[in-house]
Image: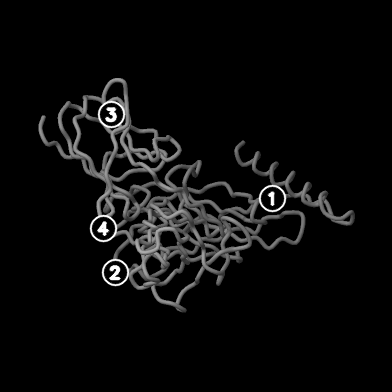
Amino acid sequence: MKHLKKYIFLLLSIVLWGACSDDDSPVYNFQAAPELEPLVSPAFVLNESSQNFIAETFSWTKGNYGFQAAPLYILEVDNDKEFPDPIILGESTRPYVPVYVGKMNTAALILGAEAGSAHNLYARIQAQLTPDVSVYSDPIDFTVTPYASVIEYPTLYVPGSYQGWDIANAPVLTSTRMNNKYEGYLNLVMENNPNDAVAFKLTTKPAWGQGIEYGAGSGPGKLAEKGGDISISPQGYYLLKVDLNTLTYTATKINTVSIYGSATGEPSADIMLTPTPSGTWTSTATLQAGSFHFRINQSEDIRYSDTNNDGIIENQSSAEIPIPQAGEYTITLSLDKAPYSYQLTPVSL
């Protein structure tokens, strides 16, 4: 039913697309979504010595959209068949894409798999017909047994006037889902010129001329390859989010970082954290038995908690971090690089 709704949406979108253009535009008739071909072996046992070899070449039917379409096919994988936050394994304009052992291993680890244990995953194809119109295949399931490895997330470098345009040592934004969406917290401050706008660019390599460089696009929040300097004012501490799928970005100025919940006292109130030069935020405070979560600017718009109780925080998680025993604790939140983490250390109980 979910996919049928997407198909209907696609059909209506295409009909409206044709109706809103000139009178001679055809009305398209969607026929069929792409379908993933069955895997040769739906159980992958990965080995580090083979990380540069192809684990599987995923292939699919092209789909029938009622017109001569040239979609961008995006191979997505998730540990939930509803694909709430998928990882991109590959992109292609052809009906197949090879996936290397190293990338499949990284995806499995990000999705919670443990080294040496089989983990169930789901794959699907997104056929992107326009930036705003996509259709999806039904998912197929398979298992992956990964090997232990340090996860290397895709990064974007952010050289700018706030750090002397030193690209080799530029801060980075991280794509924790390998989906062309990046984010990071940056201290966009120029102490010698506190009233000037901060200028910066985005690049895929920490050296000029060696990667893809992104700059200001056609309007606010827009990006363009080889665009001019991006400008932000006033200066301050910002959460920068970049979506290379749509060539857009947002910059949210951070005024406060705090914890909030029943553990902070009755009635519940924020306990403010203080920034440190290393990029962490910290506070030593007396907490009550209860729970809390982190939030930005004393608002639930940016809310972090720990779903898996592993010290790694998730954005917009509805979970709470438990405090089983009242006492004095030191809370440290690390926002210097995603995925973000925290430490909770008892001082006296």
Looking at the image, tell me whether mark 3 or mark 4 is earlier in sequence order. Answer: 4
Q: Estimate the spatial distance between the alpha carbons at disc 4 and disc 1, rounded to whole Å.
A: 40 Å
Tell me if residue 225 comes above or below residue 26 in the rendering: below
Looking at the image, tell me whether mark 3 or mark 2 is earlier in sequence order. Answer: 2
Q: Estimate the spatial distance between the alpha carbons at disc 1 and disc 2, rounded to whole Å.
A: 40 Å
Looking at the image, tell me whether mark 1 or mark 2 is earlier in sequence order. Answer: 1
Looking at the image, tell me whether mark 4 or mark 1 is earlier in sequence order. Answer: 1
Instruction: Report helix, strand or loop for mark 3.
Output: strand
Badge 3 local density, few (<14 within 10 Å), some, or many (20+)?
some
The residue wearing badge 4 is: 148
The residue wearing badge 1 is: 32
Looking at the image, tell me whether mark 4 or mark 2 is earlier in sequence order. Answer: 2
Q: Nearer the viewer, residue 322 or 217?
A: 217
Looking at the image, tell me whether mark 1 or mark 3 is earlier in sequence order. Answer: 1
Q: For the residues carrying marks 4 and 2, which lies nearer the camera in this image?
A: 4
The residue wearing badge 3 is: 291
